[in-house]
Amino acid sequence: MKYCDFNGCRNKISRGAYCDDHKRSRKYIKKKQKKKQIYHHDNKQFYNSKAWKDTRSFIYERERGCCQRCGRFVHGRRAHVHHIIEIKKDPTLRLDENNLMLLCPQCHIIEENKDKEKAQPVFPKYFQAPPAKF
């Protein structure tokens, strides 16, 4: 038996990390798994490859970390490397440096939806700021 890992909780448990009072609900876990499925796609293996990571780093260095559309400095996860011609349309261009551009999340949404105005937009509110709390 051990104590629950929740800060200050004195409940003892036989297995797991948290007691029944502090476990996350199944509803929350399913919601989190559903959110992960947003970016599950056929090219997942490609985006985890060393070749892609090296090319992505090169594009970031080439642009000196600035968005090619608005000029804002982006870093880490906020730096999106965008394929001008989609991988679906021409897989041979997926590592071509002339087919890639560095964008901030807001400009990436605009670029992704530029030709898809009538169709359903791609990740329309995924990168927007959370609602303000008063």
Image (cartoon, rainbow, N blue to C red):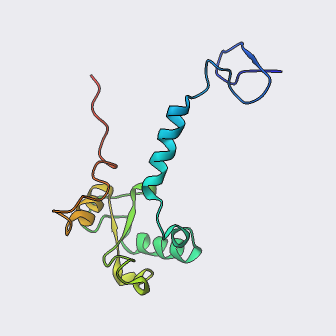
Residue 44 rendering spot, x and y as whole percentages: 52, 67
Residue 32 rendering spot, x and y as whole percentages: 49, 41
Determine whether 24 is above or below 93 in the image.
Answer: above
Q: Measuring 46% from the left and 75% from the top, which residue is drawn there?
A: 58
Determine whether 41 is above or below 29 in the image.
Answer: below
Determine whether 92 is above or below 124 in the image.
Answer: below
Q: Measuring 42% from the left and 69% from the top, which residue is drawn there?
A: 60
Which residue extends farthest left?
A: 118
Q: Nearer the viewer, residue 50 or 60?
A: 50
Which residue extends farthest bottom?
A: 92
Which residue extends farthest right?
A: 1
Q: Nearer the viewer, residue 78 or 23?
A: 23
Location of residue 77 (image quadrant)? bottom left
Q: Is residue 53 left or right of residue 19?
A: left
Q: Is residue 106 left or right of residue 80?
A: left
Residue 80 rendering spot, x and y as whole percentages: 38, 63
Q: Measuring 32% from the left and 37% from the top, which residue is drawn there?
A: 130
Q: How many marks?
A: 0
Q: Is residue 72 left or right of residue 39?
A: left
Q: Measuring 30% from the left and 62% from the top, which residue is drawn there?
A: 108
Residue 82 rendering spot, x and y as whole percentages: 35, 69
Check the picture and name the quadrant holding the C terminus.
top left
Q: Nearer the viewer, residue 114 or 79?
A: 114
Check the picture and name the quadrant holding the N terminus.
top right
Determine whether 31 is above or below 76 in the image.
Answer: above
